[in-house]
Image: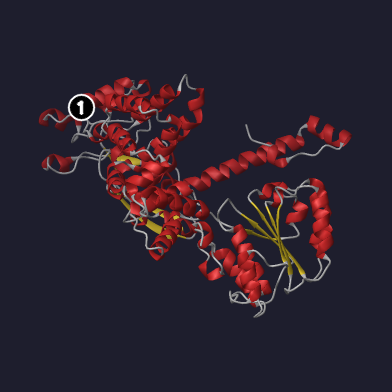
């Protein structure tokens, strides 16, 4: 007996053996069991996901000699003949080669006759979007009101090209692309039953190359078996697929984290010598960054047998989420703009240098500032150069509740007598000055009255005062992923060590430890000391996000009112019957 390829030999013959399309199987099973049958079905999806397979299983379910069932017996004459492609009442038409109206008319003329041996005459029209406009028009009437013994099953990879008049007459099911996990599990099952040795990594490579198509995966597996001599090994699959070892991607990311520009350029030159596509390299780099982001957020989702698992988890620990998102965005933009570069090498290296230039310096962010660096920071900022630092005393906030929506809280200036007696105690905290903002300051020194300062030799600090304006403070903080939490939090009260916030019940999902830690770190970086955060959940609070939304709504209402009251616009409406398109009005 001649050899039968895996894609045909292991084609599912029942809904139970169909892989990866549970949503379609459930709907069809319920319809068959309840005898709620439609006269026309449309299956859409990319190549190799099972459109024709589902259509044939449905035809068996409709014509099985046991009766209409979701579990055809597979042994009766109707089932066996459908499996062999010889059932006289199953008519399969390739619309790509029968596009003209005459072929459709001949098909529909035969539809009026009763089935020869089956319960229903089933028409499977593959790639239906290839039919001509006149052919579609010819089938509309029959498709809408076919004879009771006729069922239409249409399949297409491009439903956008199917006229809406046809779509509206069909029950439409979108078959999904197969996940890599589903493909690997199915291949493991098939190779196990075929008694063919395999390596898990090889199946990962095949699943990746199949890009969601089970048929492509089976065809590649057939090719791998032939190439490897009845085995499926990683090295042979890589050679067969022409897959390039992607270790260079990890080397690029390690060089970025080490801020090693020379290594980046050297790696790019090595890639050029190997004739690698730099556009593909940027695409692969973006995919790797996505995998690292997933490993950061849900490390358990990384498969244990994934070859790069340890490297992914290591990079997920070493790279910050903000830096990761920055690299990802630059990789996408670099891939989009590489055709505009002088050449691919220049476009690729420029993307790497852009990542290097914008990588935040962790050491500088954590380096403690000195008095000299304080004066340098002030001098470098013209907006605060005119502040007389020596005249600023250490403020202490009244420890009474202050709603974020209330006016600016008054601060008292007092002597730090307790801090003089305990030099090792925590330094006086910083607040935002009502004068122009100082972005970077030194850790404040202990301060007393002017007489005590002279006697004890203490120097005056340059603190950042906080006046209770939480929304104003947000513009000065480096929040990153914590910005959403900060915008949806209302400041209830604060003192020198603690800030108390409230969020609405609908936003309590933002209260993850990661976001709270990042918000706390941003406040610590701004004020120069640790700030403890306390959150509560309340029904309704006035958050910065609410204020911004309200201001936008007021501005939009004002803009719409101004347009409606404009004399020229009124003249157009009255004289020419013009109408105002509301969503085109934007406040200036």
The residue positioned 57% from the left and 58% from the top of the image is 50
In percent of width and height, residue 460 lies at: 21, 30
* Residue at the extreme right: 575
The residue positioned 80% from the left and 58% from the top of the image is 107
The residue positioned 31% from the left and 50% from the top of the image is 309
- From where the camera sits, is residue 264 visible? yes
Number of labels in the image equals 1
In percent of width and height, residue 475 lies at: 42, 36
* Quarter where residue 524 is shown: top left
The residue positioned 38% from the left and 33% from the top of the image is 434
Mark 1, residue position: 371
**Category of crowding for the residue at label 1, using alpha-carbon neighbours closer than 10 angstroms: few (below 14), some (14–19), many (at least 20):** some
In percent of width and height, residue 396 lies at: 28, 42
* Residue at the extreme front: 1
Q: On the rendered structure, is 58 left or right of 304? A: right
Rendered view: 235 above or below 266 = below
- From where the camera sits, is residue 31 visible? no
Q: On the rendered structure, is 107 left or right of 560? A: right
What's the colour scheme? Answer: secondary structure
Q: Nearer the viewer, residue 510 or 248?
A: 248
Helix, strand or loop at mark 1: helix
Quadrant position of the C terminus in the picture: top right
* Quarter where residue 52 is shown: bottom right
Rendered view: 87 above or below 460 = below
Q: Nearer the viewer, residue 173 or 131?
A: 131
Q: Nearer the viewer, residue 535 or 319?
A: 319
Rendered view: 475 above or below 56 = above
Rendered view: 319 above or below 150 = above
Q: Nearer the viewer, residue 473 or 265?
A: 265
* Quarter where residue 334 is shown: top left
């Amino acid at each position: 007996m001649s050899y039968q390829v895996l894609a045909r030999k292991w084609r599912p013959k029942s809904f139970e053996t169909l892989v990866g399309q549970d949503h379609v199987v459930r709907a069809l099973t319920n319809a068959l069991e309840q005898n709620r049958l439609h006269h026309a079905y449309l299956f859409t999806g990319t190549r190799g996901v099972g459109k024709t397979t589902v259509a044939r299983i449905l035809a068996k379910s409709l014509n099985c000699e046991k009766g209409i069932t979701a579990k055809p017996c597979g042994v009766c004459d109707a089932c066996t003949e459908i499996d062999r492609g010889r059932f006289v009442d199953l008519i399969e038409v390739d619309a790509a080669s029968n596009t003209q109206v005459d072929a459709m008319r001949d098909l529909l003329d035969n539809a009026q006759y009763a089935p020869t041996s089956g319960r229903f005459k089933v028409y499977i029209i593959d790639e239906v979007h290839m039919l001509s406009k006149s052919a579609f028009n010819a089938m509309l009437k029959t498709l809408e009101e076919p004879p009771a013994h006729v069922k239409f099953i249409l399949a297409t990879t491009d439903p956008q090209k199917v006229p809406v008049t046809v779509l509206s007459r069909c029950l439409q099911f979108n078959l999904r692309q197969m996940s890599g996990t589903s493909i690997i599990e199915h291949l493991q099952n098939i190779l196990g039953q075929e008694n063919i040795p395999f390596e898990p990594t090889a199946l990962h490579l095949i699943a990746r190359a199949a890009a969601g198509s089970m048929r492509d995966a089976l065809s590649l597996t057939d090719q791998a078996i032939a190439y490897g001599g009845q085995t499926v090994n990683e090295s042979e699959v890589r050679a067969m697929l022409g897959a390039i070892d992607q270790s260079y991607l990890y080397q690029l990311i390690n060089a970025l984290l080490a801020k090693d520009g020379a290594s980046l350029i050297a790696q790019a030159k090595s890639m050029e010598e190997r004739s690698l596509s730099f556009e593909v390299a940027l695409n692969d780099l973006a995919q790797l960054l996505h995998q690292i982001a997933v490993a950061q957020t849900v490390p358990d989702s990384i498969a244990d047998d994934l070859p790069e698992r340890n490297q992914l988890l290591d990079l997920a620990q070493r790279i910050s989420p903000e830096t990761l998102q920055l690299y990802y965005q630059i990789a996408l933009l670099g891939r989009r703009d590489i055709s505009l570069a002088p050449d691919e090498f220049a476009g690729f290296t420029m993307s790497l240098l852009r990542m290097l230039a914008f990588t935040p310096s962790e050491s500088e962010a954590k380096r403690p500032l000195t008095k000299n660096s304080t004066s340098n920071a002030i001098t470098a900022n013209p907006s605060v150069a005119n502040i007389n630092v020596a005249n600023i005393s250490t403020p202490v906030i009244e420890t009474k509740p202050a709603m974020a929506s209330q006016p600016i809280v008054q601060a008292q200036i007092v002597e730090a007598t307790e801090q003089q007696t305990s030099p090792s105690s925590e330094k006086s905290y910083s607040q935002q000055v009502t004068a122009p903002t100082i972005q970077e300051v030194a850790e404040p020194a202990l301060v007393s009255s002017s007489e005590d300062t002279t006697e004890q030799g203490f120097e005056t600090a340059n603190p950042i005062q906080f006046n209770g304006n939480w929304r104003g403070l947000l513009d000065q903080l480096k929040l990153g992923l914590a910005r959403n939490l900060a915008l949806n939090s209302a400041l209830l009260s604060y003192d020198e060590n603690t800030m108390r916030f409230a969020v609405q019940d609908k936003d309590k999902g933002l209260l993850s430890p990661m976001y709270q830690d990042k918000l706390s770190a941003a406040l610590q970086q701004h004020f120069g000391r640790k700030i403890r955060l306390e959150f509560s959940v309340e029904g309704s609070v006035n958050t910065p996000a609410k204020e911004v939304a309200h201001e936008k709504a007021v501005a939009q209402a004002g803009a719409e009112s101004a347009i409606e009251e404009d004399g020229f616009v009124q003249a157009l409406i009255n004289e020419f019957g013009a109408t105002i398109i509301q969503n085109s009005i934007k406040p200036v």
